[in-house]
Image: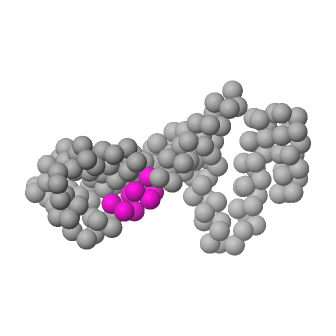
């Protein structure tokens, strides 16, 4: 079945029908997920859930918001009343969107060094997940505006 979707996708590309090509690519990837070993199928599943194989714009934004909220909750739980809410929210926004440079805006000097090790690791994970989700968001936006 995967080969049929791949040939249909190539035929749609040849005809210049971008919407149909993207649809058959999604079907092809769903078929590949069923045939893949479990450790690879998990990646296909995550790509489907988080961005509908690059077709969704809202899902990556929602995932970034959830990662931000998780970070704010972890900061609040571990630091308690020791941290200002705006500082915690800004720090997590700068972790989820690291290329924006908000760390210089929201974080005081030496903020990262004062964090417990668990929060430093979480900040690094937030940064990696944020970059991956921004890539999926960019793919969704590109497909949305290219197809219409």
Q: Residue at x 33, y 46 (%)?
A: 101
Q: What residue span does the magenta drawing correspond to?
A: 123-130
Q: In the image, is residue 12 part of the stretch drawn in magenta?
A: no
Residue visible at 33% across and 60% down? 123
Q: Which residue is nearer to you in this view: 52 or 107?
A: 107
Q: Quadrant of the N terminus?
A: bottom right
Instruction: Tell me: 52 left or right of 86.
Output: right
**Quadrant of the rendered structure where residue 100 is?**
top left
Residue 40 % position (x, y): 65, 68
Tell me which corner region of the image, top left, top right, bottom left or bottom right, holds residue 143: top right
Q: Position of residue 80 (x, y in %)?
A: 14, 58
Q: Nearer the viewer, residue 13 or 65?
A: 13
Q: In the rendered image, is residue 77 in sight?
A: no
Q: Is residue 118 left or right of residue 111?
A: right
Residue found at the very far left of the displayed protein: 82
Asked which quadrant contains residue 142, the reply is top right
Q: Main secondary structure of the magenta part?
A: helix
């Amino acid at each position: 079945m995967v080969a049929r979707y791949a040939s249909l996708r190539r035929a749609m590309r040849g005809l210049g029908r971008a919407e149909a090509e993207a649809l058959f690519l999604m079907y092809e990837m769903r078929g590949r997920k069923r045939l893949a070993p479990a450790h690879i199928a998990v990646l296909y599943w995550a790509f489907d859930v988080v961005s509908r194989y690059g077709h969704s714009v809202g899902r990556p934004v929602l995932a970034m918001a959830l990662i931000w909220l998780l970070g704010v909750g972890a900061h609040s739980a571990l630091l308690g009343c020791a941290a200002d809410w705006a500082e915690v929210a800004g720090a997590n926004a700068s972790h989820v969107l690291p290329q924006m440079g908000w760390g210089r805006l929201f974080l005081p000097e030496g903020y990262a060094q004062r964090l417990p090790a668990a929060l430093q690791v979480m900040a690094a994970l937030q940064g990696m997940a944020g970059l991956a989700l921004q890539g999926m968001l960019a793919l969704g936006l590109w497909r949305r505006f290219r197809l219409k």
